[in-house]
Image (spheres, rainbow, N blue to C red):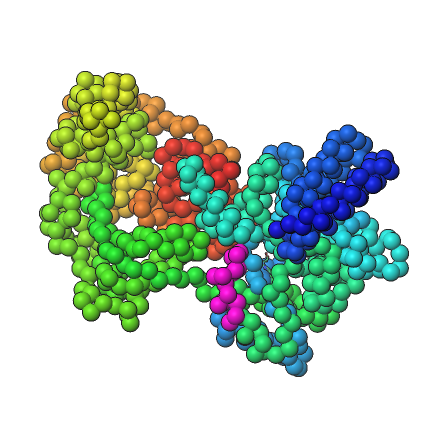
Amino acid sequence: MRNMADEQQTLLDERALAEATSDPGARIEQLRREIEHHSYLYYAKDAPEISDGAFDSLMRELRELEAAHPEFHDANSPTQRVGGYVGEQFAPVRHARRMYSLDDAMDVAELDAWIDRVEEAFGRFVPVVCELKIDGSSIALTYEGGRLVQASTRGDGTTGEDVTANLRTVKDVPLRLREAGMAGLAGGAAGASAADVPIELRGEVYMPKRSFDALNAAAEANGKQAFANPRNAAAGSLRQKDPSVTAHRDLSSFLYAVADERALAAQSQWELLQWLREAGFHVNPDVELCETREAVHAFCERAVERREALPYEIDGVVVKVNSFAQQAAMGHTARAPRWAVAFKFPPEEKTTLLRDIAVQVGRTGKLTPVAEMDPVVVAGSTVARATLHNEDEVRRKDVRVGDTVIVRKAGDVIPEVLGPVLSLRPDDAQEWRMPATCPSCGSPVIREEGEADFRCISIDCPAQALERLLHWASRGAMDIDGMGEEIVTRLVEAGRLSDVADYYTLDAVELAMLDMGRVNKDGEPIRLGETVAKKLVAAIDESRTRPFARALFGLGMRHVGKTIAELLAAAHPSVEELMAASEEDLAAIDGVGPKIARSTYLFLHTPDNVAVIERLGKRGVRLADEAGDAGEELPQTLSGLTFVLTGSLVESGMTRDEAGAALKARGAKVSGSVSKKTSFVVAGEAAGSKYDKAVALGVPVLDEAALLRILETGEAPQAEAE
Ligand code: AMP
């Protein structure tokens, strides 16, 4: 921290002196230079020479002078780092030269294969530069006449987005090049003109781990969507519509490349890094010029070891042939330079204690084993639970309660238990088995031929009942506004709700008296109250006239998501017709396979279910479509947004097609590939390259829970909390 009282004193004396000269233009310029210099020492060099107080005092004076003399306004003044508002869209920017990706080396053997190719090209090992691969968002900065004129994202490599206003708020990015840097511009010796040729420099904008944690903690406290990792957070922060939001995100940069090396006197990557430092950029200090293969290996090993201690995320080491001439000799493929390779770290793994394997009972009776672990931070977020899918999976992984287990995030999003550390297994650890009876209702559980899942098939199972009741009332189904988990649980406990037809017997008087299981400060039970009760009854009443497909979906038949329910209702627009249909009739509907036909048929011919359906009909729930219903449109709240779905959805049981249809029903577009126009990528389990692409393009990534929230509320997350 700046903390030098003498320094402050000299500065203040200097100021008094300059004020005496009463040339505001000169003073403004002097202050700007001084502030730039101290910003550079502070942000890029981490070696401040004056105190915070003195720095602030210089800033204050500059601000006052600029306010008094608007004729000296300059967008690149240090006072302008908190920018104004930019338009709705980011303008496209064509890069001076393509921004390539990097070829990956997933292990040491692949790294060696790359080194072999370099040796083949030159007949010997040639010097290479090892750099840390910063896990942030790529950025291209254009300077003209030494001044920052444009900043853009990588985009598709050829064209990125103009994020100049946002980038100005990143404090370690020089708004003007330092004098020492101007001399290194190619032709700098020949005359001043070289300085006027635009030069495009490249690097990475990143969010330090601590700032990321703080940002996510705040998002959580405000009920907003957290970022999946610091890389997403950096990309999302750079693409804010309002630069003052970016300014409040603690972003930093590391520069390491130039678009066209002919713009500089530097002849190699090593010299380029040196020049970038002189010109005022923040350059990562962990770089090494390696003369041997062993030195490269050693650098990579050290990087793996130091990774966790670094204040920012890295995901590998980039190895680059040092000499620009040799780089040119090796050239590029369509995708990436041949003269560089990214040695990728294995995905971050952590160990923690497996406390328990709990069993969750879903709406359709499916039993899912869930690992409950001591909380541990993996790849940027806390993990305490992870699905173990089914009994076979638990056996295959051989995890036992009491084990120390290894967890990682698949696709950096979904927590996954990889397996136990066998040497740490307690002697008495027992092999895990699915309980023979349902943990919720005690009925025997069954596993059908050829199925991986165990199920509780009892109609009376309270866990299923609760899930089914909630599902009926949920937004996508009958949409009973206000009927949430707490109230439904209380009603079940009070014996007032056991199946979905019971909703239609509730009245406002008894609801108002519902005991919420808590007491007020006088020790009296808290009740639901009249106002809420009246609203609930109105919402229940309103749900009676929902389209038939919504009721069908609400019944929670296995394999019948919203889209399938719509197909069923379109083919058989009343419950009588649907019940009269044979299994073959159902399977003949376009989009309905034999599996769905079977589960639908079975459900509709199980006496308990028939009884519930009859009661629903008697209580005024419409179980048939009227003319015109089919065209019912949901509010088009997602219009203008494009979603890409990747990986498989596990929690909801929806297929990707169903999820896509549900998004489209609200006006969204659903696309098969990620581009910079994509608004959100939804990453399910085992998400693949689309996820990586989203991250590379700075497209916000949502998990399945976020998708379900969108479908439930009809609202997409705010740009603020991408
Ligand atoms: P990938 O996106 O996996 O193909 O990796 C290429 C990206 O790595 C580049 O676009 C840069 O954004 C990023 N990167 C991070 N650190 C470096 C570095 N030191 N040198 C080159 N690229 C880097």
Q: Residue furthest bottom?
A: 123
Look at 42% across and 27% down and name the residue there. 635
Any part of residue 320 in sight:
yes
Q: Is residue 691 left or right of residue 351?
A: right
Quarter residue 97 falls in: bottom right
Q: Residue 577's x, y, as percent? A: 21, 31
Look at 77% across and 29% down and name the residue there. 68
Q: Is residue 350 left or right of residue 340?
A: left
Relative depth, front residue between 56 and 591: 56
Look at 63% across and 70% down and name the residue there. 288
Q: Residue furthest right?
A: 191
Q: Is residue 76 magenta?
A: no
Q: Residue 409's x, y, as percent? A: 40, 56
Any part of residue 344 in sight:
no
State the count of labels.
0
Q: Main secondary structure of the magenta part?
A: helix
Look at 18% across and 56% down and name the residue there. 434
Q: Is residue 304 magenta?
A: yes
Quarter residue 222 falls in: top left
Q: Quadrant of ligand 1?
A: bottom right
Residue bounds of the magenta highlight: 301-315
Q: Is residue 715 left or right of residue 274?
A: left
Q: Residue 601's x, y, as percent? A: 19, 41
Height in image: 425 above or below 632?
below
Q: Is residue 627 left or right of residue 50?
A: left
Q: Residue 324's x, y, as percent? A: 72, 68
